[in-house]
Image: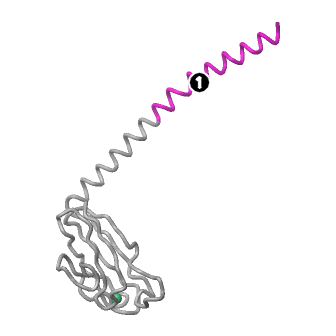
């Protein structure tokens, strides 16, 4: 008798806690998802206008083909017409020149960026797509800008 009572008490407690927990968890997840969506669309709205700036680093050692160092990150995604700055942390000159290495295609070009200097903000194409670029001085140095 006591055992039966105990078992039914437990199932009542379990039922209550399931009923109590599940809806609030579902609500919380729904709220989080909504917040995430809002944050993302706000960020997109902001970056579509003026002001988005992405920085790509030319790391120390990237002038040596064998160093394995390359544009960091090697691939970035930006809004149409956004600007990108290349930050040269190497002790050699570099460029970020659009095109399939070693042939510039004229879509964008940072020009020569001195050692330990930054490029001016370079305006990306407005046409969505994947744009390869490279360093005219070190053609093995290659990166990609995705405009979307
Ligand atoms: Cu270079």
Q: Which residue is drawn at 51% across and 32% down?
A: 25
The answer to whether 137 is drawn above or below residue 83 in the figure is below
**Residue 77 horizontal side relative to residue 9, left or right:** left
Q: x, y percentage for residue 146?
A: 29, 66
Q: x, y percentage for residue 121?
A: 24, 76
Q: Is residue 9 magenta?
A: yes
Q: Which residue is drawn at 27% across and 86% down?
A: 102
The answer to whether 97 is drawn above or below residue 129 in the figure is below
Q: Is the magenta stretch mostly helix, strand or loop?
A: helix
**Residue 65 horizontal side relative to residue 38, left or right:** right
In the picture of the structure, the residue carrying the numbered disc 1 is 18
Q: x, y percentage for residue 95?
A: 29, 85
The answer to whether 5 is drawn above or below residue 119 in the figure is above
Q: Does the magenta stretch include residue 100?
A: no
Name the quadrant of the N terminus. Answer: top right
Magenta part of the chain = 1-28
**Residue 3 horizontal side relative to residue 28, left or right:** right
Q: x, y percentage for residue 147?
A: 25, 64
Name the quadrant of the C terminus. Answer: bottom left
- Tell me which corner region of the image, top left, top right, bottom left or bottom right, holds residue 138: bottom left
Q: Which residue is drawn at 47% across and 83% down?
A: 68
Q: Which quadrant of the render holds ligand 1?
A: bottom left
- Tell me which corner region of the image, top left, top right, bottom left or bottom right, holds residue 62: bottom left
Coloring basis for residues: one colour
């Amino acid at each position: 008798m006591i055992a039966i009572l105990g078992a039914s008490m437990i199932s009542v407690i379990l039922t209550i806690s399931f009923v109590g927990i599940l809806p609030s968890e579902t609500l919380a997840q729904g709220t989080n998802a909504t917040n995430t969506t809002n944050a993302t669309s706000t960020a997109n709205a902001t970056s579509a206008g003026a002001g988005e700036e992405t920085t790509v680093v030319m790391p120390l050692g990237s002038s040596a083909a064998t160093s394995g160092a390359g544009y960091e990150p090697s691939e970035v995604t930006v809004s149409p017409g956004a600007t990108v700055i290349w930050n040269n942390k190497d002790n050699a000159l570099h460029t970020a020149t659009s095109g399939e290495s070693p042939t510039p295609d004229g879509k964008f070009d940072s020009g020569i960026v001195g050692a330990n200097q930054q490029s001016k903000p370079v305006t990306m194409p407005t046409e969505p797509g994947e744009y390869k670029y490279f360093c005219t001085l070190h053609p093995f140095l290659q990166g990609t800008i995705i405009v979307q």
